[in-house]
Image (cartoon, coloured by chain):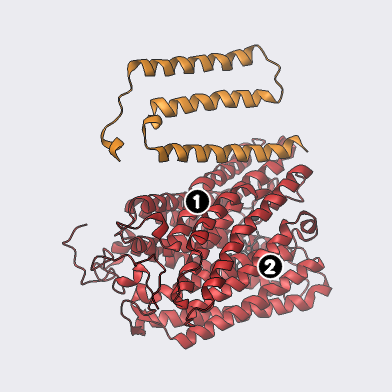
Chain colours: A red, B orange
Amino acid sequence: MATAISTEKNFFEIKKGIASWLFTLDHKRIGLMYFYAIISFFLVGVILGLLMRLELIAPGETIVKPTTYNQIFTLHGVIMIFLFIIPSIPAIFGNFFLPIMLGTDDVAFPRLNLLSWWLYVGGAVFALLTLVVGDGPADTGWTFYAPYSVQTGTNVTLSVLAAFILGFSSILTGLNFIVTIHRLRAPGMTFNKMPLFAWSLYATSWIQLLATPIIGITLLMIVAERVFGIGLFDPSIGGDPILYQHLFWIYSHPAVYIMALPAMGIISELIPSFAKRTIFGYKAIAYSSMAIAFVGYFVWGHHMFTSGMSGTARVIFSILTFIVAIPTAVKVFNWVATLYKGSIDVQTPLLYALAFIFQFLIGGLSGLVLAALAADIHVHDTYFVVGHFHYVMFGGTGFAMFGALHYWFPKIWGRMYNKRTANIGFALLTVGFNFLYFPMMILGLMGMPRRYYDYLPRFTDLNVISTVGSWILAIGLIIMLWNLIRAKKTGEKVGRNPWGSISMEWQTKSPPPLENFDKLPELNEGGPYHYKH
Amino acid sequence: MKDDNHPHIVNYKEHFGTWIGLMILTVMTVVVSVTNANLQMLTVLTALTIATTKAVLVAYYYMHLKFDQKIYRIMLWVVMGLFVSFMILTIIDYITR
Ligand code: HEM
Ligand SMILES: [Cu+2]
């Protein structure tokens, strides 16, 4: 560590100008660049979602034609999955806070880190290009199922290449974090003294590193089939469409844990910080992350119960899927047990954490309905599934991300937001969210299929409720963002540790200096969550 | 850590032995294919097993995995195990359809 660099100035002040950001090697700046890029795409995705809800406010054609609707949900899915939720927490908060929480000055490979960001931007450009060239965005759904994806005239090749490039960004981030965690922990910080957020990133990184290449190859196979007519997946030229589904889900199910694990890591930070109490079952939480990452590799077939996969394989995948629920339940149990008899300080981040637990539980339990072979035959490809995965990804990971944003906001920008307004934003988001997605579950059970721009008149009432919910959610989102943007400029300045947390990132200044610490960080006595009463 | 600075020097005999091993395995692959050995389902399995063995030999001896820290071997085997499980689970679908 060079001692010449001033710790008087924070990482914003040390250098100015656009180039000092675009070519920065500082993990904090890269994290923030991810933040701005990812939030922008999230908002684009939200607008597409709102458009779909508007179309579905009444049966029949309301605002868009069927093909356009198909393109909208595909673009919505691709943006939300590949550009928002997969990078979200690791790329933003992992980049910003992992090195600080490990007590070091940067990730192991800062240049690779910058390259990951540029690859993200490159992938995003490809995704946006689909809007302006040829026949417009793909209309296959974000899953690009063959044989339709091989036959349709829309821009599948470009979309698939976008996902391919984004995959590399993800792999490099994973690699970087694994090496950082192995090599750069502060002296004395063994694996079992590591913050749980770091543990969750460690498990996530292994999935990013090992599963992502599979989707890469698979997507290239789609391109090969489209461009050169090689018969891989399309039965009319000798391929097997179910093979595509296998390959796609071998990655895409573990990818669900790329989304969920970092969120669980955030919750494991928020809860002890606001319950002011030692986390219950540190090792159980840490190791269950690894268990989830591991078992998560062997359950992909639950997406294929109605595809024509063999009966034997279906039973095996159904059983394996039930096993994943166990380590997840372990975590929920530990969070609730941590709150028990804690000195709970109800602040906005904690509210997000509680909403996470509530909504993730609904998402997880509805997942068990889908994992049960017989039940899934009924609800597969209905709105039940749409409700389920929004509860997991948005109600779970999305809310955890907002919680993290409210938790670390004072550390990143050195200012505090208006807590009352933040709570109002939170309340509207939560109410809107549940009005938006809970009716979808009921609609699914009633038999409304997903991915249609139209529906039977008897589904109207619940669809109207859902659409109104989407407006409430949108208002909540606007209030939340407006409150934070205002706070960034005019919020009250805060010191090092506004929440009274014992986590290492709160020992340094807010915002941190370039090399993260102005004095040597100290490990907390008795483990990272040992609060003394 | 200590291994980093003191590379293991593999002696000539070890290198040569590995080479012989690889050659024998190559001959096996060729023999299996030209004699059209009727192994049915096992044809792919045999070919893959031989190829994997060869890859492991190269990795262990020529790429010095054997003399490196244990963690690298663990990583290799975890990835291999994972890959094999993907294959097995997928193939179960095909052979029981
Ligand atoms: C205002 C917020 C949102 C609204 C109103 C919304 C609405 C919808 C609707 C109505 C569909 C179903 C389309 C159909 O099957 O006909 C859908 C699909 C989907 N949504 Fe959202 N959504 C929102 C946010 C999100 C978020 C945050 C994520 C991910 C983190 C997400 C991921 C997806 C995915 C992956 C699909 C499936 C697309 C496909 O079928 O290929 N959405 N969304
Ligand atoms: Cu899955």
Give the crowd class for mark 1: few <14, some 14-19, many >=20 residues within 10 Å.
many
Residue nearest the viewer, comparing B6 with A415: B6
Mark 2, ligand 1, within 8 Å: the answer is no
Q: What residue sits 45% from the left and 69% below the top?
A: A269
How many numbered marks have been drawn onto this rendered protein structure?
Answer: 2
Q: Give the alpha-carbon distance from disc 2 to disc 1, as whole Å.
A: 26 Å
Answer with left or right where residue A318 lies relative to residue A253. Answer: right
Residue picked out by circle 1: A208
Question: At label 1, which amino acid type do we have?
Answer: Gln
Label ID, residue A387: 2
Q: Mark 2 lies on which chain?
A: A
The quarter of the picture showing ligand 1: bottom right
Find residue A359 and report its horizontal and vertical position in percent. 62, 71
Label ID, residue A426: none
- Classify mark 1: helix, strand or loop: helix
Q: Mark 1 lies on which chain?
A: A
Res A502 → quadrant: bottom left
Res A246 → quadrant: top right
Q: What residue sits 52% from the left and 72% below the top?
A: A338
Residue nearest the viewer, comparing A414 with A350: A350
Res B44 → quadrant: top right
Position of A419 relative to A235 (above/below): below
Question: At label 2, which amino acid type do we have?
Answer: Gly
Find residue B58 and report its horizontal and vertical position in percent. 44, 25
Query: Between disc 2 and disc 1, whose residue precedes?
Result: 1
- Classify mark 2: helix, strand or loop: helix
